[in-house]
Amino acid sequence: MPSSDIILTLLKKYGSPTALEYDVDSWTNLKHKKEIERLCALAYVKEVQIQKKEIHYGMNIDAWWELFNSTGFKGMLMELSDEEYAKVKQEYYEAMFKHADMDGEVKLVADSWFVVAK
């Protein structure tokens, strides 16, 4: 956030068929330790180690754009014409600039759970 929302909105605006069909709520994420423990219990896993790692760091807008060109959004970007791609990129940069700090960076928050189940 807000980067994924911005790029998805722009991809829909410029007609990416995959983006138009994409349902962000269709993904099930394990966001809390209790959810992971419940899943392990349902799978009859007795030994489980769960550790949360906070991953936060600033990225400049060029790095954010490169990130999208190497993730699942790449396929959606490839569905656009060259002109549409250029417009999406320009509008993305403008929108992200509004969220940038004094160093021109927008914070990436990728907190993750690491689980070892035996």
Image: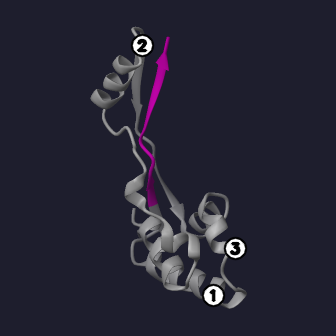
- The answer to which image quadrant residue 76 occupies is bottom right
The stretch of residues the image draws in magenta is: 107-118
**Of circles 2 and 1, which is in front?**
2
Q: Are marks 3 and 1 in contact (CB under 8 Å)?
A: no
How many C-alpha atoms fall within 10 Å of the one at disc 1: few (<14), some, or many (≥20)? some
Mark linked to residue 45: 2
Instruction: Identify the amino acid type marked 3.
Output: Met
Question: Where in the figure is residue 15, as x and y percent of width and height?
Answer: 55, 83
Furthest residue in direction bottom, as rendered: 83
Q: Nearer the viewer, residue 118 or 52?
A: 118
Kindly report the distance in space between the C-alpha atoms of the residues bearing marks 3 and 1. Answer: 10 Å
Residue at 49% in and 79% down: 12
Earlier along the polypeptide chain: callout 2 or callout 1? 2
Residue at 43% in and 50% down: 27
Question: Where in the figure is residue 23, as x and y percent of width and height?
Answer: 43, 62
Instruction: Identify the amino acid type marked 1.
Output: Glu
